[in-house]
Image (cartoon, rainbow, N blue to C red):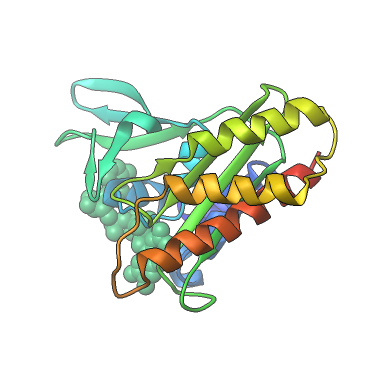
Amino acid sequence: MTYTRLVESLGEASPALVQAARTIGSPQIRNAGTMGGNLGTCSPAGDTLPVLAALDATVVLRSAAGERRVPFSAFMFGPRKSERKPGEVVQAIEWDDAGHSQVFLKAGTRNAMVIAVANLAMVVDRDRRRVRVALGSVGPTIIRATAAEDLATGLFEESGWDRPLRVEEAASARFGELTAAAARPIDDQRGTARYRRHIVAVMARRALARTGAAA
Ligand SMILES: Cc1cc2nc3c(=O)[nH]c(=O)nc-3n(C[C@H](O)[C@H](O)[C@H](O)COP(=O)(O)OP(=O)(O)OC[C@H]3O[C@@H](n4cnc5c(N)ncnc54)[C@H](O)[C@@H]3O)c2cc1C
């Protein structure tokens, strides 16, 4: 499943995954690179990976011995380290339709052809009353910001899951702080840990505003 095919076939569905796929490399890279390759590489900067975490996706692995399903939360555990055994290929990825309140954001040193300095996916599944926030490129693996998820769940609970969310400034700032606190960034050639925490907080606040508005 190349990124180009993914974007074409998903259309309006799973917008965060479509947004992530659109940021990958250039048209040539998107024509050749695949979701299987993103999972096979298992880089903490892989752009589709925070989305799979936020969608609670399941990775379907196939080998000569048969097929098994691994939740993404148990699939990746470090840079280039995954639950995939020699001889297994990623055959499919499965997730529930979580609706349209979802977003993927990526910060890099330029607008295109860039490895993420940090990326973030937020999915508000209004039917299942579930909020997921996942971060990439700010730790050895994809990180879920669970304290921020709990805060946002309370906000949606209060305002009504079927309504647009109006976020007070203080709640938005707290959501940004909690999301940044979940990050475990390092200084490297792409950015400092301090800058990464800062942009994670900025992206989190934007993600809350955008998912909140998309009722
Ligand atoms: C110029 C350039 C820009 C890039 N930009 C981005 C970017 O913006 N964001 C991003 O996330 N990545 C980016 N990448 C990385 C790369 O394109 C992606 O990781 C892509 O998904 C790789 O897919 P592929 O099918 O080409 O995999 P390959 O490069 O062929 O394989 C990568 C690894 O995955 C394994 N693999 C491939 N398919 C499967 C499968 N189905 N099951 C199990 N293992 C498998 C291979 O054995 C190999 O170990 C970029 C790469 C380049 C060269």
Q: Quadrant of ligand 1?
A: bottom left
Number of numbered markers? 0
Look at the picture and state if 195 lies above or below 45. below
Counting from the top left corner in percent of width and height, residue 152 is at 65, 36
Residue in the image at 47% along x and 32% along y: 57
Residue in the image at 58% along x and 30% along y: 150
State which quarter of the image contains the C terminus. Answer: top right
- On screen, residue 127 versus residue 203, left or right, reads right
Q: Can residue 73 be seen in this view?
A: yes
Counting from the top left corner in percent of width and height, residue 169 is at 75, 52
Counting from the top left corner in percent of width and height, residue 60 is at 37, 29
Look at the picture and state if 54 lies above or below 27. above
Residue in the image at 59% along x and 60% along y: 202
Q: Can residue 98 be seen in this view?
A: no
- Nearer to the camera, 1 or 98: 98
Q: Residue furthest left?
A: 86
- On screen, residue 131 versus residue 214, left or right, reads left
- Nearer to the camera, 171 or 64: 171
- Nearer to the camera, 69 or 193: 193
Look at the picture and state if 105 lies above or below 55. below
Counting from the top left corner in percent of width and height, residue 61 is at 31, 30
Q: Residue furthest bottom?
A: 110
Q: Residue furthest right?
A: 163
- On screen, residue 207 versus residue 33, left or right, reads right
Residue in the image at 40% along x and 43% along y: 143
**Corner quadrant of residue 66:** top left
